[in-house]
């Protein structure tokens, strides 16, 4: 903290501070001399009155001296600098990062956090002088600087702040800070970054800004009080691509970001049909609401899920696009001895009609464009597991009929990320038995076997097998046996965990197995394929969802002229989006600002729906604590005015004027009290003129 | 009795004093028969008591009528009337020089002179002691005109002296007074009341009738408003700077306590105390003294 005097030339006036003291001493030095008979009684009285009088004299002297000192300082025009200020004549380069993310839209009933933040940012800029340079970054999913480089037109920046609009994007704080550093790079003078934000913990926690030592960071939080909120966090379809005629489950996750339980009604709208469910969400908890939806056709459609609006309406509505599949895409990949089993799987799929087997190669697994609903591997020995794990991680169920002789440890390593390929240890042994093995259902309550429960479709475990992999449950990853052989050897093993992996230990080779010849095999395969893609975390992830701040892309077919393509925003309004032709013949839009359903339109015909949803990370409005903000290596200010005062200095003359007036008022009060006391005494004596002594 | 023109005993004062007679109610002892009751039994017309005859008594005093009734010898006794000694103590310390028209000393001198005149006119004897820190002058008791002249001359020559020590002066003068009588102290009593009455103790024990006249000016009693002034003590020369408005209340309290203390002690010791303000005529003091 330092003080600069703008009129330092007037410092000699400081000698006037001694004026009251001089007057005080001079006035006391020359009283008239009076002879008196005996001063003993005066001395006694003086001893008594000095105990009262003397402090009052000193108080008056101090008050007068302070008042004179305050008035002298007033003319010296001091400016107080704090937090590293004090270099008044140095050029300043200030980048204001204005948080325009969705969470800033929370309103306390009168104004949004964003409106407060704009006012604070404008206040910070108001403290800059003509020689200073500044820029404003509107921070969202991507930082948007007002000037491409630092500029001195502060008025324009303030105008840009006034016209700034709140986005529905999630904040990327690191991108904003990087952009600010880019702007400050190479600038002369002081460099400062001022972040005006709600410092939402879900965005800012864990951020460690690495700033050069000559760049200062100041944080202005616009959060005052709690911000209770209820939000729709997720809308998922299970399965993600249902088949026509299939009953899918729509799963809506509702969160309560407050300390009190909330009862909410969740409304599902599909075309003109509306269905509602009520749920009670615990404090700081979540609740799931399920809607059953029968898929009537293979045409894609959108659903809307909403809550009653609260102080933060942005996250009270979500959309989901349902893309029914005309057929189940079953990716088939066979190796060596597994080709026979894969051929039976393909044949079974074709027999089902709604499942389409698609032969793949290991090279196809590397191609990100390769899509399938289920991946079935036959005879794979577990090499290059990362290629398969990519499918598992994207939620595609993988059915694996392993290869004989492969190390058993690979059964586990496919589930583990970055697992080393180990060939040591026991291997998977093929075992033959002339009198054949018999199968049994070990988890009859599993949905796969629901259709066979009343026996109408026969026994799915019918058929015999003369060879199998000799494996025990302890050698397999943790899971559950859906079918097993009579001796307990698992035949169909579902691994437990987030990755949907199933081990198939039922050979379907001609001459080894009779399972595929049974009439129950095709229905069993159908039920197996339908149910295996349900319930796993991947299957309930929304098929396609875009966030505000991202771009929508579409690769139309050759029959579509790209210049006829339009993108319509929510409420069928034409949105000002720019369409750019890509190298591959596709189209992409500008960054999307508002959540809602967007439609690619050719002429009057809607070709494709796109869903843009509110970023769930913005719903939890809890801010960082002050200590956490300080942990960013920043100064924390309560307002933009405070930042302005820190940097531009606080002119102290108004305060000194008030102080001087207050001191003079106090001095007058003390003096007036003394005068009134004497007047009252004189009045009392007038009433008793004889005096006490007579 | 012939009178010169004296400063403190003017003709108009003598005319006004013609109606006064100094006769305080005090039992005195004296050599000459006079108007005042003595503790000594003697011959006079005032019957006092009977007492039994003892050998050696004057047979002329035997009451034969009582003997005829009781067959016992009783003597009739009478009070002995005697002349009175009035001892005047005049404080002439520096503080008595305070005041204007008149100063306290002038006021006290007027009163003392008139009092001496009244005493001598009544045939009694009067003595005068002028003191400040100690006894400066002592004129033994006398009742003649020349004695009065000497007193008046002394008063006219008298000037304020050093600081007051009334108690010390009273202690010093006690051996000088041969006979008990009336003791009149005229002073501003700027001394400790307890010390003053301790010094008066021997006089009271011996039977003196004591009168205290406390001479003060209005300025001392009320402390005039003069603003910030430097007070110089007339006795010690000490200077004190004070604002009269600030110290007045405390001063009046202190002065009031001093006077109350003197009055209280006087009442308890059966001493007559009178406040003598210099703005009231000293004749008023005789009303207190002569009853």
Image (cartoon, coloured by chain):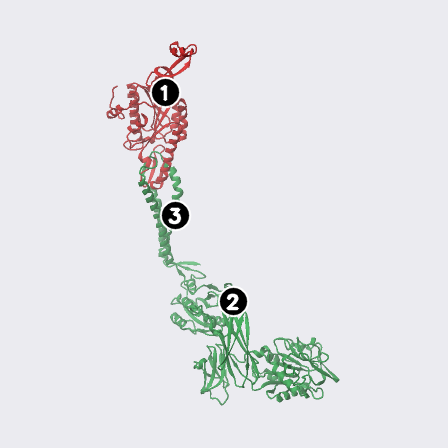
Chain colours: A green, B red
As measured in the structure, the alpha-carbon distance from the residue carrying label 1 to the one carrying label 3 is 65 Å
Q: Residues within 10 Å of mark 3 (few under 14, many from 20)?
A: some
| Quarter holding residue A429 | bottom right
Tell me where residue A111 appears, x and y as whole percent. Answer: 42, 69
Task: Name the residue beneath numbered marker 3.
Answer: A59
Tell me where residue A337 appears, x and y as whole percent. Answer: 68, 86
Mark nearer the N terminus (3 vs 2) = 3
Q: Secondary structure at mark 2?
A: loop
- Taking depth in this image into account, of A645 and A513 the one nearest to the observer is A513
- Asked if residue A384 lies left or right of residue B200, the reply is right
Tell me where residue A508 appears, x and y as whole percent. Answer: 68, 86
Would you say residue A209 is visible in this rendering? no
- Asked if residue A608 lies left or right of residue A64, the reply is right
Q: Nearer the viewer, mark 3 or mark 2?
A: 2
Residue B30 vertical placement versus A555 (above, below): above
Quadrant including the N terminus of chain B: top left
As measured in the structure, the alpha-carbon distance from the residue carrying label 1 to the one carrying label 2 is 109 Å
Label annotation for residue A335: none
Q: Chain of mark 1?
A: B
Tell me where residue A240 appears, x and y as whole percent. Answer: 56, 81
Residue A542 vertical placement versus B93 (above, below): below
| Quarter holding residue A405 | bottom right
Would you say residue A377 is visible in this rendering? yes
Task: Name the residue beneath numbered marker 2.
Answer: A260
Task: Name the residue beneath numbered marker 1.
Answer: B28
């Amino acid at each position: 903290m330092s003080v600069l005097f703008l009129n330092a030339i007037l410092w000699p006036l400081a000698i006037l501070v001694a004026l009251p003291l001089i007057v005080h001493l001079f006035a006391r030095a020359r009283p008239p001399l009076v002879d008196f008979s005996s001063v003993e009684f005066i001395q006694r009285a003086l001893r008594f009155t000095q105990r009262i009088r003397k402090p009052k004299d000193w108080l008056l002297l101090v008050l007068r001296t302070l008042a004179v000192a305050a008035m002298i300082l007033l003319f010296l025009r001091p400016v107080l600098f704090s937090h590293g200020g004090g270099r008044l004549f140095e050029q300043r380069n200030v980048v204001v990062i204005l948080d325009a993310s969705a969470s800033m839209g929370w309103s306390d009933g009168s104004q949004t956090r964003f409106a407060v933040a704009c006012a604070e940012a404008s206040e910070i800029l108001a403290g800059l002088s003509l020689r200073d340079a500044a820029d404003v970054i509107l921070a969202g999913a991507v930082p948007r600087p007002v000037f491409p480089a630092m500029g001195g037109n502060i008025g324009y920046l303030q105008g840009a702040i006034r016209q700034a609009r709140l986005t529905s994007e999630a904040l990327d704080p690191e991108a904003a800070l990087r952009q600010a550093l880019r702007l400050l790079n190479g600038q002369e003078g002081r460099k400062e970054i001022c972040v005006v934000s709600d410092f939402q913990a879900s965005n800012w926690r864990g951020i460690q800004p690495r700033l050069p030592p000559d760049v200062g960071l100041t944080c202005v939080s616009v959060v005052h009080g709690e911000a209770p909120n209820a939000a729709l966090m997720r809308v998922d379809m299970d399965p993600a691509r249902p088949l026509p005629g299939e009953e899918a489950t729509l799963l809506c996750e509702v969160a309560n970001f407050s300390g009190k339980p909330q009862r909410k009604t969740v409304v599902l709208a599909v075309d003109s049909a509306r269905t509602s469910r009520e749920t009670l969400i615990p404090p700081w908890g979540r609740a799931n609401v399920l809607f059953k939806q029968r898929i009537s056709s293979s045409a894609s459609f959108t659903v809307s899920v909403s809550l009653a609006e609260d102080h933060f309406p942005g996250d009270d509505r979500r959309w989901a696009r349902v893309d029914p599949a005309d057929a189940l895409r079953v990716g088939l990949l066979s190796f060596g001895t597994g080709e026979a089993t894969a051929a039976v799987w393909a044949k079974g799929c074709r027999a089902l009609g709604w499942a389409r087997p698609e032969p793949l190669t290991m090279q196809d697994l590397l191609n990100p464009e390769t899509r399938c609903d289920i991946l079935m591997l036959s005879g794979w020995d577990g090499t290059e597991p990362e290629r398969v794990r990519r499918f598992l991680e994207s939620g595609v169920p993988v059915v694996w009929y392993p290869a004989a002789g492969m190390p058993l440890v690979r059964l586990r390593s496919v589930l583990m990320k970055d697992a080393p390929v180990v060939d040591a240890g026991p291997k998977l042994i093929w075992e033959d038995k002339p009198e054949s093995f018999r199968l049994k259902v070990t988890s009859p309550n599993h949905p796969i076997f629901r259709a066979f429960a009343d026996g109408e479709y026969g026994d799915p475990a019918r058929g015999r097998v003369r060879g199998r992999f000799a494996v025990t449950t302890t050698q397999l990853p943790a899971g559950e046996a859906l079918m097993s052989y009579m001796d307990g050897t698992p035949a169909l093993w579902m691994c437990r965990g987030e990755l949907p992996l199933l081990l198939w230990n039922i050979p379907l080779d001609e001459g080894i197995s009779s399972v595929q010849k049974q009439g129950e095999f095709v229905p069993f395969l159908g039920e197996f394929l339908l149910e295996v893609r349900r319930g796993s975390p991947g299957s309930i992830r929304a098929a396609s969802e875009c966030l505000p701040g991202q771009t929508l892309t579409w690769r139309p077919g050759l029959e579509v002229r790209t210049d006829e393509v339009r993108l319509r925003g929510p409420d069928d309004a034409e949105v000002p989006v720019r369409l750019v032709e890509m190298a591959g013949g596709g189209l992409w839009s500008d960054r999307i600002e508002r959540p809602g359903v967007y439609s690619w339109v050719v002429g009057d015909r809607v070709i494709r729906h796109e869903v843009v949803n509110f970023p769930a990370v913005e719903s939890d409005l809890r801010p960082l604590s002050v200590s956490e903000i300080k942990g960013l290596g920043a100064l924390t200010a309560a307002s933009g005015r405070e930042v302005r005062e820190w940097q531009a200095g606080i002119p102290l003359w108004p305060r000194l004027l008030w102080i001087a007036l207050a001191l003079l008022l106090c001095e007058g009060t003390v003096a007036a009290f003394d005068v009134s006391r004497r007047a009252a005494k004189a009045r009392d004596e007038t009433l008793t003129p004889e005096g006490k002594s007579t | 009795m012939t009178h010169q023109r004296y400063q403190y005993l003017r003709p108009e004062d003598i005319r006004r004093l013609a109606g006064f007679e100094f006769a305080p109610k005090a039992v005195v002892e004296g050599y000459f028969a006079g108007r005042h009751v003595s503790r000594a039994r003697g011959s006079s017309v005032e019957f006092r008591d009977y007492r039994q005859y003892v050998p050696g008594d004057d047979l002329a005093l035997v009451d034969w009528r009582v003997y005829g009734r009781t067959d016992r010898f009783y003597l009739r006794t009478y009070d002995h009337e005697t002349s009175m000694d009035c001892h005047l103590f005049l404080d002439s310390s520096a503080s008595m020089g305070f005041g204007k028209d008149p100063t306290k000393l002038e006021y006290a001198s007027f009163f003392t002179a008139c009092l001496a005149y009244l005493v001598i006119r009544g045939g009694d004897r009067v003595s005068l002691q002028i003191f400040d820190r100690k006894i400066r002058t002592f004129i033994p008791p006398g009742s003649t005109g020349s004695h009065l002249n000497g007193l008046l001359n002394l008063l006219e020559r008298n000037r304020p002296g050093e600081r007051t020590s009334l108690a010390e002066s009273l202690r010093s003068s006690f051996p000088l007074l041969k006979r008990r009588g009336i003791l009149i102290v005229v002073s501003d009593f700027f001394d400790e009341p307890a010390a003053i009455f301790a010094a008066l103790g021997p006089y009271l024990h011996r039977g003196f009738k004591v009168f205290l006249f406390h001479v003060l000016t209005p300025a001392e009693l009320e402390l005039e408003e003069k603003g910030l002034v430097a007070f110089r003590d007339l006795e010690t020369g000490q200077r004190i700077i004070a604002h009269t408005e600030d110290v007045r209340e405390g001063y009046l309290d202190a002065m009031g306590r001093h006077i109350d203390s003197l009055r209280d002690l006087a009442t308890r010791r059966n001493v007559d105390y009178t406040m003598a303000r210099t703005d009231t005529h000293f004749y008023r003091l005789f009303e207190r003294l002569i009853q």
